[in-house]
Amino acid sequence: MASHFNFEPTARDEEVLAELEQWNQKTSDVNRNIKYAKMICDTFSFFRGTNHLFWRDFANHPALEPFSNTQTQVWIQGDLHVDNFGSFHNDEGKIVYDLNDFDEAVISNYQYDLWRMAISLVLVAKQQKFKGKEQEAFIARFCKGYLEAIALYAKDPNAIRVEFTAKNTYGKLDDFLKDVEENESREKMLEKWTKVKKGDRYYDLSLDKLEKIDHETYQKIVDLMPEYGNTLTGELAYDPKYFHVKDIAKRLLAGTGSLGTDRYYVVIEGDKDHHDYDCILDLKAQGKPTPYFYLGEDFQKAYDAEFNNDAERHAIAYKALIRNTDDHLGWLELNAQSYSIRERSPYKEAFPLDELNKAKRFEKMAEQWGKILATCHSRAAEAMTTQTAKVFAENVAKRAADQADNFIAQVQKIAKTYAAQVKLDYEAFKAANPNLKCLE
């Protein structure tokens, strides 16, 4: 096991390249080249594709201790950065902005999410040409947003019912959500991915991001739909007509860290017997989350005992961290591999980071990211059998909010020094791949 990051950025070229090779050894040559082409674009893209380096450097780090105890263990996102927040519609049809990726979610120390998110803030701020003092101010606002929300939930745990919409967000976020609502629709999403022929809907296989699947896999997925139906836990009950499969395609080129993971888009009948109401289900292979490999043997034993499979863990985490979760959330087992299933929201969009080109805008967004993260952690505590939102929030408040200056100073130190380490690691990666061109 490698030693913990010591807050002194150091060139470690051979070490990083060896770690990258080992982590990606089971990825096909084609997918590895595509993944690396995405990672080589800039330091933030490299950071997105190397969550394993973060966990290698920070798992069980002694810096966690001053601001945590056994009551601050909670579901965390596990791979947090600014692009793992986004817009989507909830099970009530409301367009919200929240966490949107749960592939790496585990029960662990809440600070891991804060640290990784803060590092991403520095990397994005550097891309926007903000200087050191401004970067520190953004991290401070992010932490204050988190701690202020925690203080509220310690006093009033019912406040975790909040959702973040165009009505209660500010800065550029409310404008973004209004634009999503006005400009995106189910019809537009379906037009992007599919074509209608003689009243039936089919995937548009001329798209670079879609590929035809073999007949055997297609039929297996169709046959497994009732088993998937047994995993639904929301308001939606399995109905063969609603879940009638119209077409299936393999999804390509999705994500950065997860690129190469088997993934399928399944278009189903949906609410009404008319193709305008069709839904796209996103089936994604789930493996052990990255923290599993770094948090130690006791963590692994507890994880293995608690979850039947990795896709079940994904669904439990998703329901814990998010309010009014997608009613299509579930899983199935295909060819001895578990797959998470969720609806692809017509309103799935990432906040445009180039909008954060003024310090005030960045500060307001950072503050809201902090509030949203605190809300997700507190919701997750409420969903756990060993925890409640109030107990979690009270303990975070006691350990962190009561010494906020020290807490914020530590997050700033971690974020700034590790962002510098990411830059060194990225330069080593770039030097080792001189002919690789950026794939946006």
Image: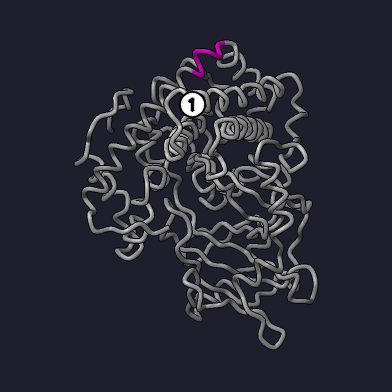
- Residue most extreme to the top: 403
| Residue 301 in view in this figure | no
- The amino acid beneath tag 1 is Glu
Q: Mark 1 points at which residue?
A: 134
Q: In the figure, 414 relative to 289: above or below?
A: above
Nearest to the observer: residue 115 or residue 41: 41
Rendered residue at 49%/59% (across/down): 285
Q: Does the magenta stretch include residue 190?
A: no
Prevalent SS, magenta region? helix
Please give the name of the residue rendered at 38% of the width and 55% of the height, measured from the top-left corner.
Answer: 38
Q: Is mark 1 on a helix, strand or loop?
A: helix
Figure quadrant of the N terminus: top left
| Residue in the image at 62% along x and 64% along y | 281
Question: Residue 180, image x and y in percent?
Answer: 69, 53
State the image quarter where residue 347 is shown: bottom right
Q: What stretch is highlighted in magenta?
A: 403-408
- Residue 394 x/y as whole percent: 65, 18
Q: Position of residue 400 (x, y in %)?
A: 56, 16
Q: Which colour scheme is used?
A: one colour
Query: Closer to the camera, 19 or 7?
Result: 7
397 or 340: nearer the viewer: 397
Quadrant for the C terminus, please. Answer: bottom left
- Residue 175 lies, with reference to residue 359, above or below; the image says below
Magenta-drawn stretch contains 407 = yes
In the rendered view, would you say 30 is above or below 180?
below
Q: In the displayed structure, does residue 235 sit left or right of residue 126?
A: right
